Amino acid sequence: MDIIHVRAKLVLNILIVLFWTGCLAQSSSVKDGFSNYFKTADSLLQLKESALALPYLDSSRSSSPDSLEYIYSLVLTARGYDNVGQPDSANNFYLKAEPLVRSLGSKEPLHFFLLYRAFHLDRKRERDEAKRMVLECLTIIDDDDYQSNYLRSHIYKTLAENGLISRDLDSVYFYITKMNQYLEKDPTKGISPHHFNTMAWYYYVTGDLGTALKTLKGYFEWYGIDLTEMKPEHAGIVGNISITYIQLGDFERAEKYQQAILEMLEKYGEEESHTYQEQLNTLATIYVNLERYDEALALYDRQIAIYKRLNKDYLTNYYYGEILVEKGQALAGSKRWDEAEAIYNEILIYAKTHEDLALENIYLYKGMSEELAHRFEDALESLLMTLSIQKAKEQDGAFAYVPTYSNIAMAYQGLGRYDLAIAYMDSALSVNQNSPTFQPDSLGKIAVLRWQVELINDKLELLKEYWNQSNDEQVLELAFRTVEEGNIIIDYARKILVSDESKLRIAEDFYQYALYFNVLGYDKSKDESFLWKALSFNENNKSFLLNSLINQHLLSDDPEYLSLLDKREEMKQMINTASAQGDIQNQYKYLALLDSVQLAVDRVIEYSHFRIIDKAWMKKNYQDKVVLSTHVGKEQLYFFLIQDHEIALKQLPIDENFKDELLSYRTMLSHSDSEIKELTWNAELAQWLSSYEIEKDLIIVPDGVLNWLPFEALSDINGNYLMESYDISYLHSLSQPNVERQKSVQKPLISYAPSFDASPLIASADIVRNGMSSLPGAYQEALEATEILGGEAYTKTDATEGAFRNTAQNAEIIHLATHAIVDDFDPELSKLVFYTNGDSLDDGYLHTYEIYAMDLNAELVTLSACNTGYGQIKKGEGVMSLSRAFAYAGVPSAVVSLWPASDKSTPELMKYFYQNLKDGQSKDVALNNARKQYLSTAKGKARHPFYWGGFVLIGDSQPIARQSNWIIYLMGLSLIIVIGAVALKKKRA
C-alpha cells in the first residue's frame, strides 16, 4: 500500500505534539492575606483543573481592584481560560491585567504575567510579540537562586521553541545551550519532560533523528525510570519517541512505545480521555503500515466506541474525516471490501452537506482502499476525482500531489497500462524533488527524501513488472537510468541527513532493485561489468554505518581533519553569536564560510556512500583471496564468487518459507538432541562451489539472516561438513576499511571469566552460557588460554567491568568467557556481564555503546559467551552483534558464538585454537583445525554441531604477529653470531 499520505499526517501530528510542550506551573507565591477562594483556585490550577478553578477566581475578585489578590486573580483567570480553550476570554483578562501588573513595579507577578501572555500570543501565532514579552521577562530576573535559574531555563526553552517554529535554527542552538546552562544549576534534578522535548525537537528538525531519540530517552535515564514506571505527564515524551520511530519507518519500535502509553493511561484510569483516543489512533496507523489490519480494526472500533460515548453529537468532521476514513482502509486491507465501500459511501453522503470536510482526502483514501482490494478501475476513478478537486482548489506542494500522482500510477499499473503509470510516477517524482521541502535546510527534508526514494522503488517495481510482461529492451534501459538516479538521491540524502537511522533506512529496498536489474543485464548480455555493478550494490548495502564510523575514526589523528572540525565549530559559534545579536550581515557571511568548511571536510573523508568494486579494486584489497559474497533477495539467493579477480554468480530460488527454514535449521544446530535436516538449497550450492578449484581459504560475506548461519556446518558434495573442504572466515562487508594502527601492547593475552551465583550440582556438560548460571568451564578456559600464550587472567570476583576497562587496552588478544545479554530490540543495549561488587560506577554490564567508545589495541577478541555473534538484522547494515562494537573499537577480528556455547566443549575447543595460533596458524585455519581436533576425540552426542559449530571468525584472518616470538628469534640469532665470532677468533688464534 502507499503510506506517503499517512506519513504526511504524522508530520503534522509531530508539530502539534511538539508545538508548545508545556509551561511553568502556576504561581505558588500565594500571599498570606489572600482569600480562601484564591487559595482554592490556585490549588486547582496546580492540579490542572482549570474549569473548576475559574468560579473560585471570580469570587476572589471581590477585593479592591488595586489589591494584590485582585491583580493575581486576573492573571490566573486569563491563564485558566487559555487552559480550557477559550482564547478570547483569556485575551480580555490579559488586557485588563497588564496595566495593573506593570503599575506594581515589582518582578512578581510581572514575570509570570509575561510568560503566560507569551504562551497565549504564541497560540494565536503572534510569535514576534510573544518573543518580545519573553525577552522582557528575561531582563527582570536578576537573582541567582533556584527559582530564578529555573525561570531562565524556561524562558530560553520558550525562545528555542519560537525559533523552531520560525526556522531560526542557529538562534535555537544558542537558546538551547543557555537553557541547559541554567538547568545544570538545579541540584534537585527539577528538569521537566518539556525541556527534553524541546532539545529533541531541535535535533528532529535538523534531521538528526538518532540524537532526537537519545535525547527523548535521556529523560528516563536522568530520573532512573523505565516505561513500566511511566506517568501521564510522560505521555508526550514517549509519544514523541514513537512518532520519531514512525518517521524512520521503524514501526516495530514505534509499536512498543505506543503500547506503553496506552497501558499507562489504562493504569491511571484515563481510557475515556482525548489523549487515549489519539494514542489508539496512532497505534492503529502503525498496524496499518505493518499490514496487521485486523489489529488496526480492533483499535479503530475501540476509538469509535469511546468517541460515541463521550459525544452525543458524534457525527462530526473528525468522526467521518479521520476515524472512519482510516477504518475503511483497514477494512480493505483485511479483504472486507463490502464493509469498506459502505463506510466510504456513508462518508460521501455526509460530505455533501459539510463543505468544510476535505473531500479530496476522502477520495484519496477511497482510491487507495480500492487499490488494496484490486478494484483498479474504481480506484482510478476515485483518484482522478482527488486530482480534480486539488486542482480546483489550486492546492500546491508535494504534500498535496505526491500521494495522488503515485497512487494514480499504481492504479494504471494494476490495469496493465504501464506507459501511463510511468508518466504519473514521474510526475510524483518531479513534484516531490522540486518541492521547497526537498532542500537541505528544510524542516520537511526527512519526509520528502524518504518519499523520493520510495517513489523510485515504486517506479522500479513498476518497471520490473513491465519488463516481465513485455521483454522490451527500452524498459530495461529506463530501469538502468532509474537505478542511477536513485543512487544519486541516496548519496545526497546520506550527505545531508545526520541521523544514522535515517541514513540507513533511506536505502532499505533500493539496493534490492539495483542488484536485480544489474543481474538481469548480465543474464541478457553476459557482460561481466553488470555483475561487478551488482556486487557493488550488494556490498555497499552491508555495514554502511560501521564502515563510515571506522573511516571517521581513522581520521581522528589527522591534523588537517581535526583543524577543519575546529574551524567548523568556530563558524557555528560565530553564527550563533551573530544571530543572538541580530547581526544579519555577519550571520550570512559565516553561514557561507561554514558551507565552504563543510565541503573541505567532505573532501578529506572522501565522502561518498557508494564504493565501486571491480577487478582492480579486488586485486588491490584482496590480492589472491577467494571471496563468496551473498545476498538474500525476495525471490532469489545470490552468491557472488570472486576468484583470481574473476567473478561468477549463482542464483538459487527461495520462497516465503526461506527464513523459517533457516531459523529451524539453526535451532537444530544449536540443540544437541536435534536431528539435523539439510537445507533445501544446500546441495545445489555445494555442487556449484565444487566446480571451482578453491584451494582452502574462503572468505564469506553474509547478508541478512545468513549472518545467523555457520556455513562450516553445511554439507559438501560428499556429505561431509563444509569445514572439511574450506577454512572459512567472515567479513561484515568487502568494503570494510583496513584498520592499521601502531599497536602498543604489554600482554600477549588477557582473559576474563567472572563468577556468578548458581548451584554447584549442575553438571558442566549440561551448562550453556546463557541465563546467569555459573560457568565452571570458563575459569579453566581463561587459565589455559593464558598458560598457552602468556599474559594475565582475571577470574571470578577479580573479573569486574573496572578490571576490563583498566587493562583491555594492553592486550594483544582479549578473551571473554562470560555471559552476554543480547537485546534484539535495541542492539546498543546488548551487554557482556562481569562480576560486580555493588559499585554504582562499575555495574557489571559492559554495553555495546560503551565498547564503541573504547580504543583497543588487540588483534583479536574472543567472545566465548552466548550469542555474541547473534543479533537483530538491519537492512543495509547486517547483524547488530557485539562483535561490531569491537570492530569499531579497533579490533580487526573476533571469534564469536552464534548460539549459547557449551561450558563443557568450549574450553577444549579454545585450548586447541590458542595452541594453533601459537604455532603460527592463521586465525581461520586455527579455528577450523580446533574444530577438527575436537571431533577427532569426540564420540556420540558430543559430535553434534552444537558443541563445535557455533564459533565463527569475523574479520582479518592473518596470523597473530607475536612480538615475543620475534624477540626470542632475534636473541637467538644474536647469540649464534656471538658464538660464531668467538669460535672464529679462537681458530685464528
Image (spheres, helix red, strand yellow):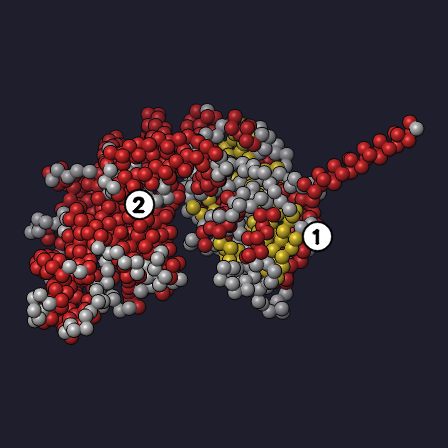
Q: Which residue bears the numbered disc 1?
A: 787
Where is residue 797 shown, x and y percent of the image? 60, 62
Give the vertical position of 571 relative to 659 (above or below): above
Give the image location of residue 198, x and y in percent.
29, 52
Nearer mark to the viewer, of 2 and 1: 2
Q: Residue at x 41, y 37 (%)?
A: 565
Residue type pointed to by label 2: Tyr
Instruction: Give the SS element for disc 2.
Output: helix
Answer left or right for 525 relative to 419. Answer: right
For disc 2, the marked residue is 173
- Residue 947 x/y as whole percent: 61, 54
Examine the rendering and report whether any part of residue 493 can be seen.
no
Check disc 1 and give the amino acid type.
Answer: Glu
Task: State the image quarter where residue 237 is shown.
Answer: bottom left
Helix, strand, or loop for circle 1? helix
Q: CA distance from mark 2 to mark 1?
A: 56 Å
First in sequence: mark 2 or mark 1?
Answer: 2
Q: Quadrant of the N terminus?
A: top left
